[in-house]
Image (tube, rainbow, N blue to C red):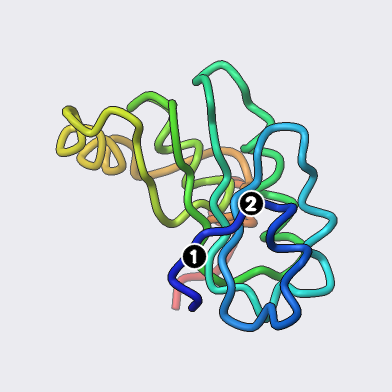
């Protein structure tokens, strides 16, 4: 990895994108990354305010397109959103206010089962219950 997280504009200028890191802001659709997903080491999606939910869709879109690297939620999100962020595909978190980091990370264990399908569990609960036990 380059060690530096580039803005989207900086990243687009890179001649060698292998091992690179890029940060997307609200309004910057991840479609620009589509041809380079296997070269990216890190994608950070910035949440400037906790009420801006576009990053959830960006994460899901990246995972559905096949991105397997580190997908980090950065910025202003609240503890109650961590489970949903993880379900959309985020696997790293960088909170703007890390004072409550321990309890925020502990909140990832608040739920053990989900009804809906999501990036972290593609089958809804009723389909999982129909699966034979192994």
Mark 1, secondary structure of its residue: strand
Q: Is residue 79 above or below residue 71?
A: above
Residue 37, horizontal then vertical, whole percent:
71, 72
Residue 53, horizontal then vertical, whole percent:
63, 26
Classed neighbour count for the residue bearing mark 2: other residues with Cα under 10 Å, few (<14), some (14–19), many (≥20): some
Quarter location, residue 56: top right
Q: Is residue 72 above or below residue 42?
A: above
Q: Nearer the viewer, residue 96 or 64?
A: 96
Q: Is residue 114 above or below residue 36?
A: above
Q: Is residue 25 above or below residue 42?
A: above
Kindly identify the residue that appears in the image at 36 percent across and 44 percent down.
94
Quarter location, residue 74: top left
Q: Nearer the viewer, mark 1 or mark 2?
A: 2
Residue 24, horizontal then vertical, whole percent:
65, 46
Residue 6, horizontal then vertical, whole percent:
59, 58
Residue 17: assigned label? none
Q: Nearer the viewer, residue 118 or 63?
A: 63
Is 48 left, or right, of 33 in this rendering? left
Q: Earlier in the sequence, mark 1 or mark 2?
A: 2
Q: Nearer the viewer, residue 1 or 53?
A: 1
Mark 2, secondary structure of its residue: strand
> Pointer 1 and pointer 2: residues touching (CB < 8 Å)?
no
Residue lying furthest top in this view? 51
Kindly identify the residue that appears in the image at 70 percent across and 45 percent down.
58
Kindly identify the residue that appears in the image at 43 percent across and 71 percent down.
3
How many numbered callouts? Answer: 2
User: Mark 1 = which residue?
Assistant: 70
Residue 7: assigned label? 2
Quadrant showing the C terminus: bottom left
* CA distance for labels 1 and 2: 16 Å
Quarter location, residue 57: top right
């Amino acid at each position: 990895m380059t060690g530096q997280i580039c803005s989207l504009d900086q990243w687009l200028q890179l001649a060698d994108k292998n091992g690179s890191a890029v940060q997307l802001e609200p309004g910057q659709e991840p479609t620009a990354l589509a041809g380079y997903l296997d070269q990216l080491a890190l994608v950070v999606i910035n949440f400037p305010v906790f009420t801006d939910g576009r990053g959830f869709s960006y994460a899901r879109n990246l995972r559905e397109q096949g991105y397997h690297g580190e997908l980090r939620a950065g910025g202003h999100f609240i503890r109650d959103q961590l489970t949903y962020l993880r379900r959309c595909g985020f696997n790293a978190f960088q909170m703007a206010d890390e004072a409550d980091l321990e309890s925020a990370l502990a909140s990832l264990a608040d739920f053990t089962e989900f009804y809906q399908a999501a990036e972290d569990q593609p089958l809804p609960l009723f389909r999982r219950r129909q699966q034979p036990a192994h």
